[in-house]
Amino acid sequence: MRILFDQGTPVPLRRSLHPHTVDTASEMGWATLTNGELIAAAEGAGFDAMITTDQNLKYQQNLTRKNLGIIVLKTTSWPRIRTSISQIISGVNSLPSSGYLEIEFD
């Protein structure tokens, strides 16, 4: 699976998502794109999923006709995310092609 990290998604998370391929919006030259533009660019480039920390995404974008699975991490805190890696991996591995999943942290 090819995964895109949106701005704000802690980059150290990528090490835990092996064997999936992970690129960041910044690495792709997409750091300044709006959410809608970023989703369209990710779909056009063949990404299967996007991981973001933007909790307002579902209110800002119509996600019903997207061919991109989206996971929203409900924190930007790497220490909190690090303690829930198995939950994130499970979410990535079970995410349908156009699915949407929010992951909460204690």
Image (spheres, rainbow, N blue to C red):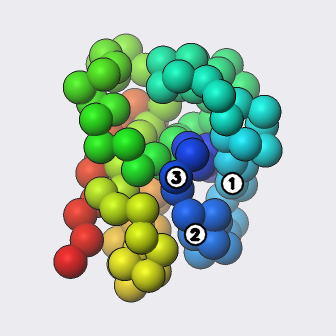
Instruction: Bin the neighbour count of mark 3 within 10 Å (Cα to Cα): few under 14, some 14-19, many 20 and up.
Output: some
Going by the numbered disc 3, the residue's amino acid type is Gly
Res 85 → quadrant: bottom left
Residue at image point 23% right, 26% down: 59
Displayed quadrant of residue 60: top left
- Rendered image: mark on residue 10: none
Task: Give how far across and how far down residue 56 sits, in percent.
Answer: 28, 35
Query: Which residue does the numbered mark 3 point to in the structure image?
Result: 8
Alpha carbon of mark 2 to alpha carbon of mark 1: how far? 9 Å
Tell me the residue at 48%/18% (across/down): 36
SS class of the residue under badge 1?
strand
Tell me how far mark 3 sits from mark 1, CA to CA. Answer: 14 Å
At label 1, which amino acid type do we have? Answer: Val
Under circle 2, the secondary element is helix
> Which numbered disc flags the more N-terminal residue, 2 or 1?
2
- Name the foreground residue: 33 vs 1: 33
The image quadrant where one finds the C terminus is bottom left
Q: Earlier in the sequence, mark 2 or mark 3?
A: 3
Nearer to us of marks 2 and 1 is 2
Calculate the distance from the C-alpha at mark 2 to the C-alpha at mark 3.
Answer: 11 Å
Question: Mark 2 or mark 3: which is in front?
Answer: 3
Which residue corresponds to mark 2? 13
Residue with the most extreme front position? 32
Are the two marked residues, 2 and 1, in contact with CB atoms closer than 8 angstroms? yes
- Image position of 28 (left or right of 3): right
Who comes first in sequence, dot 3 or dot 1? 3
